[in-house]
Image: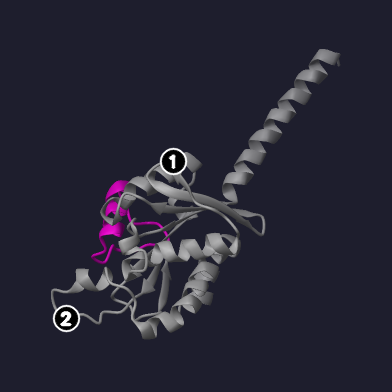
Amino acid sequence: MSNSTIGKIKQWLGLEHKAAASIEDTSMKYLIVGLGNIGPEYAETRHNIGFMVLDHLAQKFDAKFDTGRHSFVTEIKSKGRTYVLVKPTTYMNLSGKAVSHWLSNLKLTPDQMMVITDDIALPFGKIRIRAKGSAGGHNGLKHIEQTLGHNNYPRLRFGVGDAFHKGKQVDYVLSNFSDDEKIDLPGIIEKAAESAIAFGSIGLERTMNQYNTK
């Protein structure tokens, strides 16, 4: 076998190795999207719990958010997995723009993404993780569904309760947690953050079994 042929084989094997590495990297990468609204007036509101969970994750892994397309974005690593944390800057009603962009940019499929959002249908502190589901009246989830053309993507619903009078839903979700809720909030945020990491490390099914609260 000539040296030139051997060289070509080595080159081909090198390219194949790079391609395999690229595929492997993608399979170990996950997109975690926390829904919320930008601006200090919304920072500690119930509707911003997705942002709060991602802020907690970033702080825990000593990561800083940068400004990206349609979002604030950062990256963390845990147990050989890479997690891209995205906080859409489009405001809640246009969250799908950031989701669509980052799925495409990272070459990920929707089942490699978890969306974290507030849910008034769940009692405060209850966590419900699902592989798919309806928007349930949530405008952020509605736009993601419209943008993707389906609702087959994992999501974590963080219960914020429904202690509001008729017609006051918007005021309720755009207000801060109560003083009593703030006592337990850090621990629940930590649990939600842990479940986002578990989603990548042990898979969705085991994460649901471990973190869905009764």
Instruction: Report the side of 124 relative to 24 (left or right).
Output: left
Location of residue 11 in the rendering, given as x and y in whole percent from the top left corner: 74, 23
Location of residue 91 in the rendering, given as x and y in whole percent from the top left corner: 30, 53
- Report the residue marked by disc 2: 165
Q: Which residues are magenta?
A: 131-155
Amino acid at the residue labelled 1 = Ser
Q: Looking at the picture, does residue 122 appear above or below residue 30?
A: below
Q: Residue at x 50, y 42 (%)?
A: 106
Which of the marked residues, 2 or 1, is nearer the chain's N terminus?
Answer: 1
Q: Residue at x 33, y 71 (%)?
A: 46
Amino acid at the residue labelled 2 = His
Instruction: Report the side of 44 relative to 198 (left or right).
Output: left
Q: Residues within 10 Å of mark 2 (few under 14, many from 20)?
A: few
Q: Which mark is residue 104?
A: 1
Can the viewer see residue 126 in this picture? yes
User: How far, Cα to Cα, is label 2 from label 1?
Assistant: 41 Å
Q: Looking at the picture, does residue 109 appear above or below residue 5?
A: below
Q: For numbered disc 1, what is the local secondary structure?
A: helix
Q: Residue at x 40, y 41 (%)?
A: 69
